Image (spheres, rainbow, N blue to C red):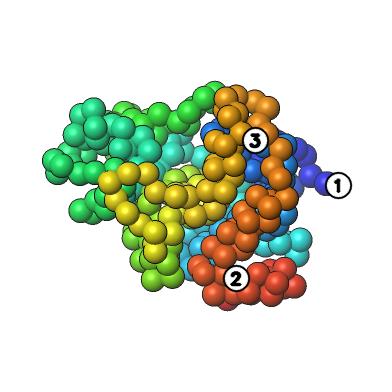
Amino acid sequence: MPDAVHLGSGKVRELYALDAGRLLLVASDRISTFDVVLPTEIPDKGRVLTGLSAFWFARTRPITPNHLLALRSDARSTECRRLTMLPIECVVRGYLAGSGWKDYQKTGEVCGHRLPPGLRESDRLPAPIFTPATKATSGHDENITREHAVRLVGAERFAEAERLSTALYRFAAEHASARGILIADTKFEFGVDGDGRLVLGDEALTPDSSRFWPADEYTPGGPQPSFDKQFVRDFCEKTGWNKTAPGPALPPDVVAGTRARYVEAFERLTGVPFTRYLADPQVVLG
Ligand code: Q0Z
């Protein structure tokens, strides 16, 4: 990557500085499951996630400004405005899954939201809830109370982040459910620009930052299959892998099936044939 300084690596992404004000986010084809990056890549996964994120950034500009400056012709990298990121993850939940379900079973609450009694795993919530989490440098993000989040970002920023996150989730969940995909929950990251304005950053509303469930298989009362990673999870369970690194290599049929699910999510949500996106990435910005 000439003329770019490598700033850091995520599990499946790379971050570079282009100049003082601009970053380059590159999505790889790496896939993680049970928090471990697998040795086998899923071809075009990075392009699917980049195209989806760009699609949502373009469509949600009426709700909130975002960091996207340009989508590159490689279809898997984006130029972004450099922000000062808030030290919280802005999670919105529309359904009861993962740590939300765990916390509810223990306390009847999730991040200070008291929920009705008798909810089952994966039930839809009466209304989406904002459940902030800390950014763990090592290990897993931890749900925090509203009070804790207010101490980290201030009351005004907290209120704005909650309002914008909830509005983004409602918009995306309605769009997706009409196309056969339930967005059970999602994580946003906001930053502040040079003028002190809150700006949506990172990636948004992808299967890596959200739980996507196939709507036609939705059966509350237990865990739901993952729209994108279920073949990978089923394969990993069947190998008897102990879920510590290194993970198992994936066989060709699992790779092909998983790639097809990513492409299917892209096409259902954007309405754009994936081959058309590869030929001209700008189509998702339309
Ligand atoms: C995103 C991350 C990745 C490793 C920092 N617009 C922005 N301004 C300032 N910082 C960030 C952004 Cl998006 C920022 N991350 C997450 C992404 C590799 C870490 F590709 N960290």
270 relative to 231, above or below: below
Residue 37: give its label.
3
- Mark before the other along the chain sequence, 1 or 2: 1
Q: Position of residue 135 (x, y in %)?
A: 48, 31
Q: Position of residue 270 (x, y in %)?
A: 54, 70
* Foreground pick, 256 / 111: 256
Residue at image coords 43%, 39%: 89
* Foreground pick, 23 / 25: 25
Residue 2: give its label.
1
Residue at image coords 44%, 59%: 214
Label 2 sits on a secondary structure element that is helix
- Mark before the other along the chain sequence, 3 or 2: 3
Q: Is residue 58 visible?
A: no
Task: Tell me if mark 1 has few (under 14), some (14-19) or many (20+) residues whose alpha carbon lies within 10 angstroms of its own.
Answer: few
Residue at image coords 44%, 50%: 225
Residue 284: give its label.
2
Rounded to the nearest whole Å, what is the CA distance between mark 3 and mark 2?
Answer: 28 Å
- Mark before the other along the chain sequence, 3 or 1: 1
Label 1 sits on a secondary structure element that is loop
